[in-house]
Image (tube, rainbow, N blue to C red):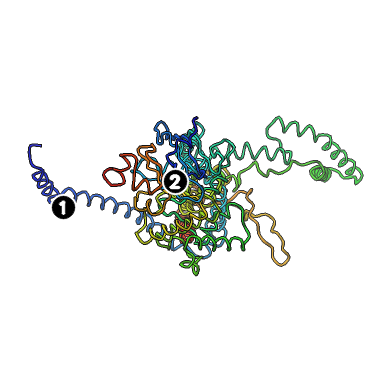
Amino acid sequence: MSAAPHQFLGRAREAVKSRSRAPLWALLFESIVRGITGVVLVALLYIVMTIVWHGAPRLDWEFISQAPRNAMMEGGVFPAIFGTVFVVLFMIVMALPLGVFGAVYMVEYAKGGTFSRITRAAVNNLAGVPSIVFGLFGLGFFILFIGKNLDHYAFDIPRNEAEAKVWEQRVAPQVKAARDEAVRLADEKSLHGGDRGAFIRDYVSGHAPVMHKKVFGQGAMFWAAATLAILVLPVIIVSTEEALRSVPRSMREAAYGLGATKWQVVSTVVLPQARTGILTGAILAVARGAGELAPILLVGVAFSMPGLPLTEPVNFGFFKMPVVNPFSEFMHLNYHIYTMATQQTNPELSRPIQFATTLVLLMITLAMNLGAILLRRHYSRK
Amino acid sequence: MADATARSPNEADSAPYYVELRRLNFFYGEKQAIYDVSLGVPKNRVLALIGPSGCGKSTLIKAVNRISELTPGTRTEGDILVGGESILAANVNTIELRQRVGMVFQKPNPFPKSIYENVAYGLRIHGVRDKATLDGVVEWALRHSALWDEVKDRLKASALDLSGGQQQRLCIARALAVQPDVLLMDEPCSALDPIATGKIEDLIQTLREDYTILIVTHNMQQAARVSDHTALMWMGKLIEHNRTEEVFTNPREKITEDYITGRSG
């Protein structure tokens, strides 16, 4: 306290004044930041422009609405668009409730004990798993474990060699009976030579018990969607958690103060106010899910399919409604791009298809995001 | 436990307490926020809690509808009685308690819903679905909180479009709609301008006829204007509790005198 306070004040005023003139390093820093942002922008523009430049000439209504023809070199990519859209739809239908309720548990119910710490660690680790590992998990868990067991218990399909042997032994008497009957009929008709052999073969395959065709234990849209759902789960959980935490404490207190139960507070106050943030998470999840190939590579994506993955149409009399069969294999734009780039021998023909397919994928992702953004705006206005 | 009521300095008004705190201790984790406070308020009276920031007034009032225990790690010792029954007993249903003991918060906190839905919310969560009942109660609650004339033509408008003072009266209406008999008000006017404050104070005067009110306030004049009894809290302890007139004209404690005359706090 040797000097009078006004001396310090004077010095402080001078320092503040001199700092209000932008020094050189501030300008430098600003230009660096601007430059880096510019690089990102240029990179993005370059990618999009390249795709549009090479893809747009090949893109027409036929390309979007038709199936590929002539060894994939003609026609369009409609089955792949169909597969991509429905896999992502199934994915978000599975992932959204799971992720939202997971986040609700973590934010509203978990008391910070061991279980919630393990859950949190699991979510964080899930976000860091390479995507091909999800594909292997989908194959191993969904198809080979759940799917095969469902097939076994529902349709009596053997799960392994030993069960296959047991199945064969079980049907052996019926096969033998059918064969005996065939031989008897062949004798009756007095068939000989090749005719006789063909008749017996046909008769046996028509009358002996046949193994049920696989339903669940094979690659399918449903399993691909489930695999992707697990992949995007952390995205949804993290953004939902953030949205839930951003709901002010005063809102919860107001509801509790009126005698609301915890679930009522969550369902009538917290979740409605968090829905914008939750939808943001859903948008991110859709974008991520539509862009992945590795996780679905092993769980049902098909190089080429004769038709769309549909069941028998539901007949309303005046209108036959087509129904998507989730337990069918499917084509996918990402895989189509991959096969076009690696499996084709005529680059002149396949290159434009690759670019046009990529362009379609970009447009679909954009359209889905746009839809989600409009939905979000609609909700946040209310 | 000695006869806690007898320790009360509130000898001037001998009516039995409707809300009563007996040797209340409150802890946030290891930190004690309230030390051995015993006080109460008779039916249809207004008790003002005054004291400097952080003295435990809000904590105290939030213990009465047990909203304080929503904060993890808190602990309550002693007893609180409402209408002669302990509300800290193990078998007390906090849902029911909070319906009986309504609360108005420091900052107006209407839900981002319509005016109508804000008032109807409490009834809806208690399972009322009948439109006529909801309509009737909404109108009654809005009239009772002196807001009806201002909003009757725009019940479907968002509550967030109301002014701060209107929002606070809406929050009072929302609390009244579930038919409580005690109202807790935690500095209900601290975020409002003087005119809105005046309206809320007038409202408290009319609400007093039907409800037992505990109000926390920083504003000494407000305590003097609206309350029958005043309690001064100081660092978690109860310093003085008496009829408001007595506290303000003839304080017994030196701390009270210093505080109400603005020499401390």
Task: Categorize mark 1 by other alpha carbons within 10 Å: few (<14), some (14-19), many (20+).
Answer: few
User: Can you identify the residue that label 1 sits on?
Assistant: A20
Q: Secondary structure at mark 1?
A: helix
Camera-side residue: A183 or A247? A247
Question: Which quarter of the figure has residue A176?
Answer: top right
Disc 1 residue type? Ser
Residue B220 location in percent, x, y?
Answer: 34, 50
Pick the front one: B36 or A318: B36
**Tag on residue A183?**
none
Q: Quadrant of the N terminus of chain A?
A: top left
Compared with A32, B234 (above or below) is above
Q: Position of residue B159 (x, y in %)?
A: 46, 61
Q: Which residue is mark 2?
A: A245
In space, the residues marked 1 and 2 are separated at their CA atoms by 38 Å
Residue A356 visible in the current orientation? no
Neighbour tally class for label 2: few under 14, some 14-19, many 20 plus, Cα within 10 Å: some
